Image (spheres, rainbow, N blue to C red):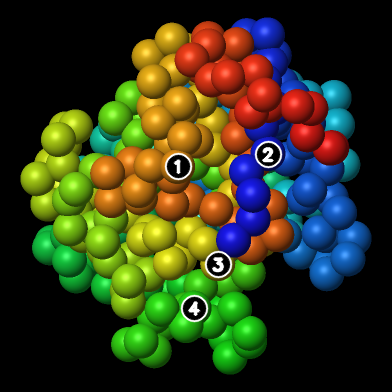
């Protein structure tokens, strides 16, 4: 478990630009070291804002987009192309404007696809992750059913006002999952009620986990998650990476944190 580091930016626009620059550096470094990089995207206004900033970043062309694997932390179980789906929003924000290898883009199943049931869709995505993970050391020990996840370089999560991350909501069964890497979520308090989500064990297999929070409506959630709350009551508190956990906030989202919590984090 890595200790959270906090970086607080003046406003959400600056936060998005700085996070995009940071992500470009991580991708380029991973590609230089290994030949490829693996990133888990998040939806919501902060995740999409980061993608839009990445698309206009001067260093965007430093990334070899054909050697980048993209996954998602969660998805709304809606028809393909629905404007509320995270993958639809990501394509509009960035993905349709960069030369990605389609075989390396891994959206979660849609409700009108091969899996009409959210639990079957979750199981299929878990199988896809396990196939990409191979037999290496980062096959999650928590995935007792034989699954695993790749060694994600960066896994990004938006933080909800109720402290949810991905589609892991406080007190719901999905946040208590310890064996599966992907689950179907039923009865989510935020519509739509059916979703597919990575679990905390899958999230924690990432090298780095970045939590994004901007706006006054995220201030209380950030304060709760960083104050030692339990992960069942505050899922964001249970999201951390193997080597680094980074909270990227704007001043409004950090407004209820004591100043002692966020000395400058190293780049």
Query: Foreground mark, 2 or 4?
Result: 2
Q: Name the residue nearer the viewer: 168 or 119.
A: 168
Give how far apart the Cα atoms at labels 3 and 4 are: 7 Å
- Mark 4 neighbour class, 10 Å CA radius: few under 14, some 14 to 19, many 20 or more: many
- In which quadrant is the N terminus drawn? bottom right
The reply to whether callout 3 and callout 4 are in contact (CB within 8 Å) is yes
SS for tag 1? loop
- Report the Cα–Cα distance between label 2 and label 1: 14 Å
Q: Which residue, given by chain and number where applicable, does mark 3 sit on?
A: 205
Tell me the SS state at disc 2.
strand
Q: Residue 39 location in percent, x, y?
A: 62, 53
User: Could you tell me which secondary element the residue under label 4 belongs to?
Assistant: loop
Q: State how far apart marks 1 and 4 are (Cα).
A: 25 Å
The residue that disc 2 covers is 5
Marked residue nearer the N-terminal end (1 or 4) = 4
- The residue positioned 55% from the left and 53% from the top of the image is 240
Answer whether labels 1 and 4 touch (C-beta < 8 Å): no
Crowd tier of the residue under label 1, counting other residues whose Cα lies within 10 Å: few below 14, some 14–19, many 20 or above: few
Residue drawn 48% across the image and 51% down it: 239
Q: Nearer the viewer, mark 1 or mark 4?
A: 1
Q: What numbered label is drawn on residue 140?
A: 4
Name the residue nearer the viewer: 185 or 65. Answer: 185
Label 3 vs 1, first from the N-terminus: 3
Which comes sooner in the sequence, label 2 or label 4?
2
């Amino acid at each position: 478990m890595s200790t959270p580091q906090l970086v607080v930016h003046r406003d959400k626009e600056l936060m998005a630009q700085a996070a995009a620059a940071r992500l470009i550096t991580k991708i380029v470094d991973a590609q230089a070291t290994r030949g490829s990089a693996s990133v888990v995207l998040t939806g919501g206004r902060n995740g999409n804002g980061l993608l839009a900033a990445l698309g206009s970043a001067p260093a965007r062309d430093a990334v070899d987009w054909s050697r980048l694997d993209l996954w998602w932390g969660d998805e709304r179980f809606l028809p393909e192309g629905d404007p509320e789906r995270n993958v639809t929003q990501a394509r509009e924000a960035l993905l349709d404007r960069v030369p990605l290898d389609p075989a390396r883009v891994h959206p979660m199943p849609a409700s009108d696809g091969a899996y009409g049931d959210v639990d079957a869709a979750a199981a299929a995505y878990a199988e896809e992750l396990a196939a990409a993970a191979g037999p290496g050391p980062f096959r999650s020990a928590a995935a007792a059913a034989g699954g695993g996840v790749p060694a994600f370089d960066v896994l990004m999560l938006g933080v909800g006002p109720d402290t949810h991350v991905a589609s892991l909501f406080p007190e719901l069964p999905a946040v208590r999952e310890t064996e599966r890497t992907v689950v179907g979520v039923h009865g989510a308090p935020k519509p739509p009620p059916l979703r597919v989500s990575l679990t905390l064990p899958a999230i924690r297999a990432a090298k780095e986990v970045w939590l994004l929070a901007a706006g006054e409506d995220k201030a209380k959630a950030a304060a709760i998650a960083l104050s030692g709350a339990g992960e069942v009551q505050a899922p964001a508190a249970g999201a951390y990476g193997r080597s680094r956990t980074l909270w990227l906030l704007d001043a409004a989202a950090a407004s209820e944190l004591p100043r002692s919590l966020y000395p400058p984090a190293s780049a």
